[in-house]
Image (spheres, grey):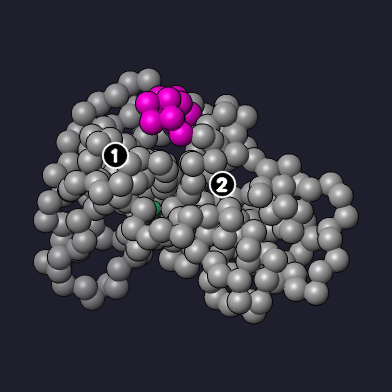
Amino acid sequence: MRVIDRPSPNFDARTRPIDLVVLHYTGMQDAQTALARLTDAAPVAGKYPGPWQAGDVAPDAPLGKVSAHYVVAEDGAVYRLVAEEHRAWHAGASSWDGEGDVNHRAIGIEIVNGGHDFGLPEFPDAQIDAVIALLGGIMERWALKPARVVGHSDVAPDRKLDPGEKFPWKKLADAGVSIWPEPYRGPLPESDDVVAHTQQQLAVFGYDVHATGAMDGATKSALIAFQRRFRPHQIDGALDDETRKLLYGAT
Ligand SMILES: [Zn+2]
């Protein structure tokens, strides 16, 4: 694994021990644009044009300062932007295991990929091999289990789609650096309240969902995030048997 230091000024102090890794795609034109944005101490809209902002935005309009601990390029080069001990600014408004602001306890990895705004390109093998090697080291240094590696869309399901349905989570799981649930094989239990039970399972898995018994927006968003990761061929938020069996298998 080739590591290149490209320090970012965008970080501050953690208040919690590291116990989570959040994977992202950069969603920008190319690696150099993403690296510029993630190391920019005073980003303005005119420097980063793209479909994510209105055409009439003022060029000098300030953007939020962002960063990640690592950026992994398509060729497998790994850029180190922020030391793992510090809090990088990648997840934004977020929640996992009932706790908000996951940046305090997460290591953030930005994987260079145009994402949904740029036609959802495939992730090259060299890039995924580097992500797996990087995760292996992180998990060893901080004693993290495979279930502690999640996507940005998991911790912010109402706002984020990344790393996206093309991301090869199964390949990561096969390498021991993430999970891939086996669908539950038995008959699904009869229940009067499938929605409330599903909400409990989604919350146990980590999503910010409460057992209200009603199919609310948070529940739908979490189901879509779960499917985007584990059933990428059908992402519709439906509480069907296949989704329920995967959720049983995951919890
Ligand atoms: Zn992200």
From the top left corner, tell me how far across and down residue 142 is, in percent. Answer: 38, 31
**Is residue 10 positioned above or below 176 on the image?**
below
| Amino acid identity at mark 1 | His
In the figure, residue 47 lies in which quadrant? bottom left
Mark 1 lies on a secondary structure that is loop
From the top left corner, tell me how far across and down residue 146 is, in percent. Answer: 53, 35
Q: Residue at x 35, y 40 (%)?
A: 18
**Is residue 210 positioned above or below 30 on the image?**
below
In the figure, residue 160 lies in which quadrant? bottom left
Q: Residue at x 76, y 47 (%)?
A: 183
Q: Which secondary structure is most common in the magenta stretch?
A: helix
- Is 92 included in the stretch rendered in magenta? no
| Amino acid identity at mark 2 | Lys
- Is 142 included in the stretch rendered in magenta? yes
Q: Quadrant of the N terminus?
A: top left
Instruction: Say whether residue 27 is left or right of residue 149.
Output: left
Instruction: Say whether residue 154 is left or right of residue 104.
Output: right
For label 1, the crowd category at 10 Å Cα-Cα, with few meaning under 14, some 14 to 19 and many 20 or more, is: many
Instruction: Identify the mark at residue 69; answer none if there is no mark.
Output: 1
Distance from disc 1 to disc 2, alpha carbons, whole Å, reads 22 Å
From the top left corner, tell me how far across and down residue 151 is, in percent. Answer: 48, 49
From the top left corner, tell me how far across and down residue 173 is, in percent. Answer: 59, 34
Along the viewing direction, whichever of 83 and 45 lies nearer the viewer: 83
Magenta range: 132-144
Name the residue beneath numbered marker 2.
Answer: 166
Q: Residue at x 75, y 70 (%)?
A: 194
Instruction: Say whether residue 112 is left or right of residue 10.
Output: right
Along the viewing direction, whichever of 11 and 25 lies nearer the viewer: 11
